[in-house]
Amino acid sequence: MPESHLTLALVSIVVLGVGAQWLAWRLRWPAIVVLMLFGLAAGPLTGLLVPQRDLGELVSPVVKLFVAVILFEGGLTLRWHEFLEAKGGVRRLLFPALPLNWVFGSLAAHYIGGVSWPVALVFGAIIVVTGPTVIIPLLRQAGLRRRPASYLKWEGIINDPIGALLAVLVFQFFTAAPEDGAWQIIAKLSVGAAAAIVLGYAAARLIALLYRRGWTPEYLKSPVLLMVVFVVFTAADMVHHESGLLATTVMGLTLANIGLADIEELRRFKEYLTVLMVSTVFIVLTAGLDTEALLLLDWRLIALIGAVLFLVRPAAIFLATFRSDMTLNERALVAWIAPRGIVAAAVAGVFGPAMVEAGYEDAAVLVPLIFTLILATVVLHGFSLRWLGRKLGLAASERRGLLIVGATPWSVELARTLKSLDIPVIIADSSWAHLRQVRLGGIEYFYGEILTESAEARLDLSDIGYLLAVTDNDAYNALVCSRFVPTLGREFVYQLPISSDVQPRQLQNTVTGRVLFGEAAYYEVLLSRYYRGWRFQKTPITQGYSAQDYFERVGEEAMPFLLVRASGKLVFRHGDVELKPEPGDSVVAFISPEAQKERRSARSDAADSAAAAPGP
């Protein structure tokens, strides 16, 4: 193959993958859906990209290594505090839900799909996985509450390697050499699983030792970690086929929960890398789909896919979670949401042809059957997760809430004003005394250090879309903003202007959040004005009372801080950007006593005019 052709194919995959991610963000669609559409358009529909033709033997090893990193990054997101909060449901989703899914799926494949028992049992083992490559991007967009999100995340990440090993066990049982008995196969699998767990745990401890002792420079920490992930996956896979997925998952889970100081930076790097890898893998797999294989699906196999969606998964989940601490709505959500992903496709791609070679001719339907199931679950579950979560009360309708870090008199006044406009507000402060007025005002609060792991465990931010860091410590405000930028986005994170003249503007732009209001909103200025009688007031803008009327009336005796759009969206004034209210918006401004009197007088005059007007 010409080098230029290979380069063009690789660049095309990256462009399609990242372009699909961007388009999904703009359309607010599930990213996986757009990725699959792009892959199908580039591959089966047009033939412009055929991975088996363009990449040759690179396809399989690249996909395997990328999946290993994706599962490792998934393990990095598993925190013990989430497990402790949702441990009852998580345990039920691992056992007995996983074996029930296998049994019910196998029964459906045999009696509804009409395939032989060996193929049915392998099919049942493959469909128990709900891959993190699909579920984590969906959760990122769905805005689920923390507990139901934890159920789906833990199930997807833990079940992926376990389901792959189950499929290996069933496959080897039917295709092993005659001299290998069932106990020998189970023993080999047990050795592989044990080796994977030991390798993953030891590798995580080794990384922690290297980092804590300073044996790895800062610029090499992420590359060294990526190298170790590849080594662990390969070593475990050499012990037993598909054990590498379990090893990398264990490594990520261990590393996430041993108190490593660099874990946030590593998690952020791996998250960015994983977005690129997920995009690449989905483009490659869907572009390489053989459309002729889909013709093997008859009405019975289509009925089987329907049974998996509407009977197998719901029955297994409702039985497994009976009398658990999961609510009925949580059980309904988890019973429906089960998108299959890369691991299911990769396992089917390996075992389908191998079973055909072993004499099980009906195994030829495994690959098209699994890919059709992936397409169906990605589309149906991808588009319904956010909607169903909101209907069941398990997801925020919109992330329009505000987190205020710093309980000052004026920030408490701002919170009260926003609360009167039905905007969710949380005030966080490490001083119990500072929170007194917050508690008396019935405002939701967090008492403690916002940057600790304890805060992450106790604080549910599913409603929060904006942050204000308004303490009297400029450096701390900047640190808080930098901590929440990856979660909320830089355009939604604000802090008070830095008062020190020594602080270079370049540092302000790269490290801090956006400057709230502008250079006039220093901490000391706002506090002084509050004690001189300045207060926050909300003013609706209407067709009869325009934005121009409002700004002319309040003049220089007001600091318009933000707009509350008719949709509930918040728009903060920052830097030199002026607010542009529209009819239906409400302006929230910090107003002087004189301006307050002027507004009261204006309202009184308006009321008198209305009373004096002749009746109809």
Image: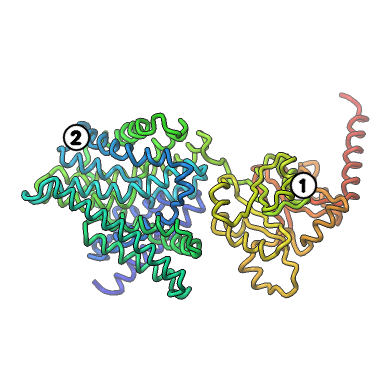
| Rendered view: 521 above or below 389 | below
Image quadrant assignment for residue 252: bottom left
Place of residue 78 in the rendered image (x, y in percent of width and height, measured from the top left): 43, 52
Residue at which label 1 appears: 413
Toward the viewer: 608 or 132? Answer: 132
Name which residue lies at 21% across and 51% down. Answer: 189
The numbered mark at residue 110 is: 2
In this orientation, which residue lies closer to the viewer: 603 or 203? 203
Report how far apart the C-alphas of labels 1 and 2 lie in the structure: 65 Å
Mark 1 vs 2: CB contact within 8 A: no
Query: In the image as oriented, which residue stretches furthest toward the left?
Result: 178
Q: Residues within 10 Å of mark 2 (few under 14, many from 20)?
A: some
Coloring scheme of the render? rainbow
Is 210 situated left or right of 573 in this image?
left
Q: Amino acid at mark 2?
A: His
Say which of 26 and 78 sits in front.
78
Tell me the residue at 32%/45% (across/down).
129
Quarter of the image that includes the C terminus: top right
Q: Quadrant of residue 379?
A: top left
Q: Secondary structure under badge 2?
A: helix
Q: Secondary structure at mark 1?
A: helix
| Quadrant of residue 8 within the rendered picture | bottom left
